[in-house]
Amino acid sequence: MTPTKTVNHNFKSGFVVIAGAPNSGKSTLLNRLLGEKISITSDKPQTTRNRILGVLHLENAQCVLIDTPGIHKASGPLNTKMVEVALSSFQDADIILLLVDATTSGKDAHQTLLKALETQNKPVVLALNKIDLMKKEALLALISKWSQMMNFTEIIPISAATGDQVPVLINSLKGLLPDGPPFFPEDSLTDVSERFIAAELIREKIFRLTGQEIPYSVAVTVDQFSENPKATLVTIHATIHVEKESQKGIIIGKSGVKLKRIGEEARAGIERLLNTKVFLKLFVRVEKNWSRDTKSLAKFGY
Ligand SMILES: Nc1nc2c(ncn2[C@@H]2O[C@H](COP(=O)(O)OP(=O)(O)O)[C@@H](O)[C@H]2O)c(=O)[nH]1
Ligand SMILES: [Mg+2]
């Protein structure tokens, strides 16, 4: 006997991979689409290191969004790993959402990506982001330029930061989703743990509060994550791993001022995420050249 496969024509579901160059606003857009901060953002390229999944629940549809580390020319093992993660996520996609920073969009930066997209046999939606920073005439010229570069399913100008035009984007994605049952239960937002997001929020503050080389030499691990019996307080111990003694000094700062600020800002973010009081204790440790060592990369989850 052949089992009958029932397709519910009233429901649509699928995977949307958000691809694009570093800093185009992929993580900002994911957070905007979900209405919750699950992916960290900063003005430094390569803030996102892992694949982050978020579930967007719509009426009669479910859109599983994948935030990827940006695609760029790889250099060094950590970067190579990030590009691999981004490219391999295309395979799981029903729709590819290409996000481009409209203010800096030049063709060169996207060549690697366009080449990879041409070989995919699936809808590609182009979202031109950061239109809050642009004049309308410049935007129209840009739309015409991109429409000649590749045969996109749709081109939608948006602002992930203000939310402008984001509903239009959601509608377009919904229309392109295949028929199918939901992948995730109604109340789920992401597949990563609160513990992981907590470590990421600490890393975000380091990205935002330190300059130049420091962010790329930092990994964060959560060593303890425990709730008191009444669930009114979460205690977190986390370690910030750096590659050199000098970097440890910069993270800690004069009389510990920098580390204190990182801790305060991270705690506020984690409290918003968990919706409870948080006690956060941070340690700083030197792990020589961890970003060039495969074993350390694995230990830190990359
Ligand atoms: N003005 C403006 N800034 C944006 C917008 N979207 C993202 N950004 C900023 O661009 C930077 C990179 O964003 P992020 O989401 O980390 O980019 P990602 O590397 O692609 O994930 C951050 O400083 C964001 O605040 C937007 O629509 N308008
Ligand atoms: Mg990102």
Image (spheres, rainbow, N blue to C red):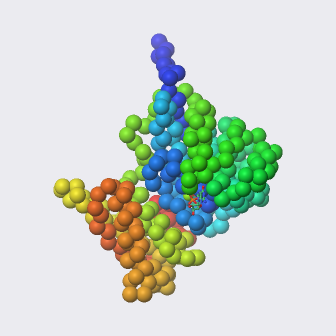
- In this view, the residue in front, 131 or 294, is 131
The furthest residue to the bottom: 255
- In this view, the residue in front, 102 or 40, is 102
Q: Which residue appears at 54% of the width and 64% of the height?
A: 42
- Evaluate whether residue 26 shows in this view: no
Image quadrant where residue 47 sits: bottom right
Q: Which residue appears at 49% of the width and 74% of the height?
A: 209
Vertical arrangement, residue 225 with respect to residue 180, above or below = below
**Number of marks present in the image shown:** 0
Q: Position of residue 27 (x, y in %)?
A: 54, 55
Vertical arrangement, residue 38 with respect to residue 281, above or below = above
Ligand 2, image quadrant it occupies? bottom right
Vertical arrangement, residue 164 with respect to residue 266, above or below = above
Q: Quick check: 210 left or right of 127?
A: left
Q: Position of residue 168 (x, y in %)?
A: 60, 40
- In this view, the residue in front, 270 or 116, is 270
The furthest residue to the left: 229
Q: Which residue appears at 29% of the width and 64% of the height?
A: 278
Vertical arrangement, residue 176 with respect to residue 51, above or below = above
Q: Position of residue 29 (x, y in %)?
A: 55, 51
